[in-house]
Image (tube, grey):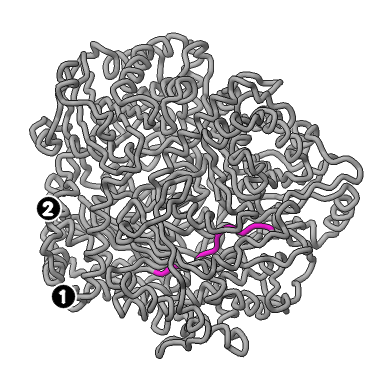
Amino acid sequence: MQFCGSCFCIGSAFGSSSELLGRLLPARPTASRALPEASPESPVSRANGILSVPFRRRWGAVAITAALAAKRRARAASPELSLVEKSPLDNREYKPITLRNGLRVLLCSDRAADRAAAALDVHVGYFNDPPDVQGLAHFCEHMLFLGTEQFPEESSFDAYLTANSGFSNAFTEAEDTCFFFSCSTAGLRSALERFGTFFQKPLFTASATEREVNAINSEHLKNVPNDVFRMGQVLNNRANPAHPYHRFGTGNIKTLLEDTAAEGVDLRGELLRYYRRYYRAPLMTLCILGDESPDVLGRYAEQYFGGIPGLAEGERLDPAAAYEDQPPFLPEAFEQGIEAVPVADARELQVVFPVPFAPGNARRVEVQEAPPAPTRGRMSVESWRWYNPASHVGCVLGHEGPHSLCALLRRKGWITELDVSGADDTSTFAVLVVSMELTEEGLEHKDDILELLFGYLNFLRNLPAWPQELLSENLQLSDAAWASRETDGPMNATVELAGNMQAWAFPRDYVRGNNRLRNGQGLSGTVDALLQYLRADNAIITAVSRKFEDAGNAVEPWYGTRFRTRPLAQQPRWLRVPAAPGLGLPDPNPFLPRNLELKAPKSKPSSKNAIVLPESKIEKVWEAFFTQDTEYGVPKAFAFIELRTKLPRSSARAAVCARIYESMFRQALQETLLYDAEVAGLTFAFSTSMRGVELFFGGFDDRLSDFASTALGELLAFDAAKNAQGFRAQADLLQRELESVDTQEPFKQASYWSGLATLVDEISFKELQAALAGLKASDVATFASALWASPVVGLSLCEGNLRQHEADSLISNVRNLLKSENFIAAPESEWPVPRVAKVPVNSFGQGVVLVHQITDPTEENSAVELSFQAGRSTRSGSAEDLKRLSELQVLSAILSDEHLGALLKPIRASPHRDEVPRSDSSGDYPRFYEELRARQQLGYVVSCRLDRGEGAFRLVFLVQGAVLGPMQVLDRMDAFIKSGMSLIDAKSERDIAALADSLAQARLVRPQQLLEASQRRWVEICSRSFLWQRRLEEALALKAVSKEAVVEAFQRWLAPGGSERRRLVSICAPAKVLPTVDQLESNGAQVIKDPQSFARQQSQWPALPVRSKA
């Protein structure tokens, strides 16, 4: 599966819940369809292991003859099928239409929307790449953004979106390519006009063709050290060579340029042929969301997309026909296991079960009623999608309760995690994946683990029938989730809906898709049909560990992963082995929601910027806040709690103990409490940070208070000293996480080192490694006892479907369990807060420079992070703070290519192509991304952003690539910054005002869901700011920004000679291109060898001011 602009890899091979280790070790990378961090709609996804991909309900549909299309349109017009089913909380109005060219469109009218969006899905992907031009679908996706006949400027579309608070992106999958954007509601019509030309008259210029191949190659080089891509391609390599699943879908310079040139293939000619063949209206689905009526949106669709070519009379176009008769895997793939060597220090065992769909059936759901169960051994697409049997089987196979496989393997000390997920659901086959994170002992017992797995599957497969009570419980949970389902943000929603339209023939199912499980006569039989594929002789088995390094005797060709094969001599035994004693079916879930009644009537806000002020009760050792929801109407509630204490980050040893304590508790309670609660929609999170202890309880409110008391009571009673096995497993996991820091992408390492040089209390991963050595379970227990005795104050916010007395009772129970009356009160001036060092003023020259050598032999890229501190950041809401923030936001927007990019987010990777260069009235003065990424092709990860930390603003410029050495890249970055004044000069006062207004509108977007609104209020409480209308005040400050103020900010903070130019460069590179200290010092650099000592020696930005009351 290949991904484009949505393939934002987040962090290392293993995740961390703590703030400290979250900085050192960002969350596990996942090839997911997540939107960029810049987007206010960014979802949070849970990774399922370095080999697996989160479950993706992205299925294709087949284009058909004009006659069949007309027949289906007529059928869809029947009332019960054309009426879109939506959740009770969904206030959007949906209208499905089909244009004369065969394009199916879903119009979503949301009169309350303050953002608009659209997504167009083309049912063709890399499965239809020509065998001699691998990566062509991905390449076509890139090229469509680079100019059309009506709008020939390469950055025309994104320039328009930039002026209208917008963003665009795309991704390529096996059978689908999806393009999408969002913008202000007022800008939707013209955005659709530009967007529609992509699919009618793109330029595909010869100059852009070769240049964009370089971009795709840079993307590939970025992915080479990433174990998600590496192990995914190992799996693809085992597929049937005659099936496109075997191919390298991303492509690189070899497949697209060198091989085609050697074979005399005209790449641009192949691109044009591919586009003209497949980019046809009947293969497309379009979703448009705006605040206008469905009829108005429909006119836009007809006007701007009605000209997309359709099919001639009698013409048939079926992309999957080229491979539908080929099995994805040949028999020999099931006869041998693979042992692969990762880059990160990972241990994983993955079992992949292919589920082929019977040929000759529909490629999407075309039935009007629940289909019958498929014949044993012949799964159908319609049964698979209608009944979603993977969900029912996964809830048992992936269960973590007392009778589960996961609990048994944990008790043996062989695994730390077991996940069951779906992946690669196509129109001809699907995949079910079981992945297990192994302990060191578990790696030695991998065959025993497999025997237990197959024994349990044999037990499930031999049940007389799938238990009705399990089906009923799963359906009940799904119904409850549907009843409380809030709408996604416009861009997420349109992407999902365009995909659903490819999977489901009738509008009735467009919104529901697989978001709500379906019942029917064939449900139990479809589950049984799936179980027939979950056999040892239909399993692709892969083990991953660095211990296989010496024995790896084969190399995967595209990423260079070393692996070896081994015969599966135990397979005949696995086919008949019984279930181990103690394994069985799950007990009934005790946390099923009972009452979804709302406790306050839902009402619309009085105005767009209306703010609900929380109630507060301020005491000496506890500050409690409460807000009852009347806006979202969701039967859920959330309780945020923070206990201020310095202990969790008082030393490296304390930080390590805190991390292990967190993970030990969670794993120990999964079996008896937390797993069932999570399945039933209840969440408990416990973590520590520099500020202290953070607790979170959330979910259906009818059981929330009891659950919070039970979970917290279990946490306080948990004795780490009595769980030596759990300690060993989590200490081993942490050790491997720390050892894998050096395998992170270079730009993440560069960010880590610059953080170490500016955050005064930051603890290095080397210090954590030293603290971990010799640590015992009893040490963690001692730390835990001290932790709960150390808080000086508690803060809380209860929000949602609660009455005041219910919130009071919940917090009272929490306080009683914590014995808050024993808290030793301290003035707010002594509360733990982050401290940020001032980088010395260096008006000219290189400034402060950090250099770090990359030790990963698979990494070819270097990274250069160039940052400029730009004054104190307080979050206080003072006039001075708001003025500086707004001026820096506008300055960042002028210099960068992505002003909506997480205006104030931490480091992020620049997307693949897929934020194409953007320009505006700056004329011949290109902005950072356009100049260094698009024109100079210096690398794939290129970004410029404003970073607002808890002490100082930073303007950060980043380039990662392998084209030039880091010093040459730094010279190019400096040249751009020197030209920055030209970019500003090219702007008129009117331009500045328009840009500031666009930024202001983005700040005023209301939260789409209750949790986001609650999180915003909680941030104000934790930061002690209490600026409840922060976004409105920031928007008003933006509207007051003048060109003169932007010029002054640039000259003061960034320009050579600036009076407060505080410049810090962080370079991470392989040894062959790493600059020497002599080189740097000869250029006037202050080279820092010990970043922590440097940070402690500098003066500091003043700590955040605090207010004693809200």
| In the depicted structure, whether residue 316 falls above or below residue 662 | above
Amino acid type, residue under disc 2 in the picture: Ser
Mark positioned earlier in the residue sequence (1 or 2)? 2
Identify the mark at residue 721; answer none if there is no mark: 1
Q: Is residue 624 visible?
A: no
Query: In the displayed structure, does residue 158 sit left or right of residue 80?
Result: left
Q: Is 421 one of the magenta-colored residues?
A: yes
Query: In the displayed structure, does residue 111 sit left or right of residue 981?
Result: right
Choose top left, top right, bottom left or bottom right for residue 1061.
top left
| In the depicted structure, whether residue 305 falls above or below residue 24 | above
Dot 2, crowdedness within 10 Å: few (<14), some or many (≥20)? some
Residue 861 spot, x, y in % from top left: 36, 34
Image point 45% across, 79% down: which residue? 570
Q: How far is the residue under mark 1 from the one under mark 2?
A: 22 Å
Please give the range of residues in magenta. 418-427
Characterize the magenta stretch by its predominant secondary structure. strand
Q: Which residue is mark 2?
A: 650
User: Relative to the observer, which residue lies in front, 871 or 705?
Assistant: 871
